[in-house]
């Protein structure tokens, strides 16, 4: 079993990327490694310590293929919308090239989602459909910290992930594929998990902090 990567805390936090083209689709991921990551994930906080999360780990080829098809269908709808990065070209060469790379990378994953060795679906007991922003924030705040901890733990073990939510356009269909009780449990994301082709990920370009930092008020 691969050893953990020698990353400092800052390196781990700054290099856990959305990995798409560098997922190794041909290398198996031991379930023991997934369990290690989940053991760390569930150390995250949850509202009133309810720990209402559930983790559906999908390795069956047929189920992965079915989820991949749902994801591809949702992706095509997204790619046709004005919100898709490839449809937001501004005429600025550098920015447009970045958007094209993102669009190309997203399409690559969409076409191969069903081939990724492991798909993890983090879920949370209950539903908050049509809830207020306060209710929604409180609810999802009990799942997302744990799901991101999973991604960090995966990175430390040489695994890549990518936070995706497009399949939620067809959440009920996904629930049927996986036997999730749709009326009682909500899916929060779909995380493809695979070993990465190389582990030399770097910090990404981000907005200058001073342009988004507000101290003492807006």
Image (cartoon, rainbow, N blue to C red):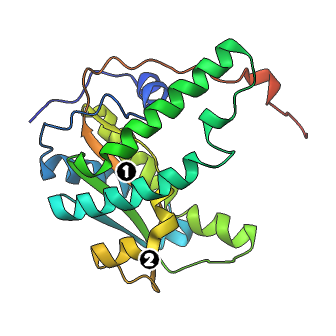
> SS for tag 2?
helix
Residue 52 placement (x, y as % from top left): 44, 73
Q: Residues within 10 Å of mark 1 (few under 14, many from 20)?
A: many
Left or right: residue 42 versus residue 205 is left
The image quarter in which residue 201 lies? top left
Residue 39 placement (x, y as % from top left): 28, 54
Q: Name the residue tied to disc 2.
A: 172
Q: Which residue is painted at 66% across and 69% down in the image?
A: 136
Query: Which residue is outermost to the left?
Result: 1
Residue 38 placement (x, y as % from top left): 29, 54
Residue 46 placement (x, y as % from top left): 51, 64
Label 2 close to label 1 by CB (< 8 Å): no
Q: Which residue is painted at 34% across and 58% down in the image?
A: 69
Left or right: residue 53 versus residue 86 is left
Query: Which residue is outermost to the top?
Result: 93
Disc 2 versus disc 1: distance between alpha carbons?
A: 17 Å
Q: Which mark is residue 191?
A: 1
Q: Which residue is painted at 26% across and 20% down in the image?
A: 198
Q: Which residue is painted at 46% across and 38% down in the image?
A: 106
Left or right: residue 21 versus residue 216 is left
């Amino acid at each position: 079993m691969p050893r953990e990567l020698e990353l400092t805390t800052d390196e781990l936090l700054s290099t856990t990327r959305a990995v798409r083209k560098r997922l190794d689709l041909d290398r198996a991921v031991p379930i023991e490694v997934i369990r290690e990551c989940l053991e760390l994930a569930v150390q995250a906080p949850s509202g009133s310590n309810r720990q209402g999360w559930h983790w559906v780990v999908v390795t069956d080829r047929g189920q992965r293929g079915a989820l991949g098809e749902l994801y591809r269908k949702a992706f095509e709808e997204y790619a046709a919308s004005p919100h898709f990065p490839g449809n937001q070209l501004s005429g600025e060469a550098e920015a447009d090239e970045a958007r094209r790379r993102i669009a190309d990378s997203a399409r690559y994953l969409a076409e191969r989602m069903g081939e990724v060795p492991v798909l993890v679906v983090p879920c949370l007991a209950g539903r908050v459909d049509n809830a207020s922003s306060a209710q929604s924030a409180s609810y999802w705040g009990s799942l997302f910290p744990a799901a991101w901890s999973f991604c960090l733990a995966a990175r430390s073990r040489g695994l890549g992930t990518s936070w995706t939510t497009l399949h939620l356009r067809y959440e009920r269909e996904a629930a049927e594929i996986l036997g999730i009780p749709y009326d009682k449990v909500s899916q929060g994301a779909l995380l493809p998990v695979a070993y990465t082709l190389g582990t030399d990920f770097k910090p990404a370009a981000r907005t200058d902090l001073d342009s988004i930092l507000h101290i003492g008020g807006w």
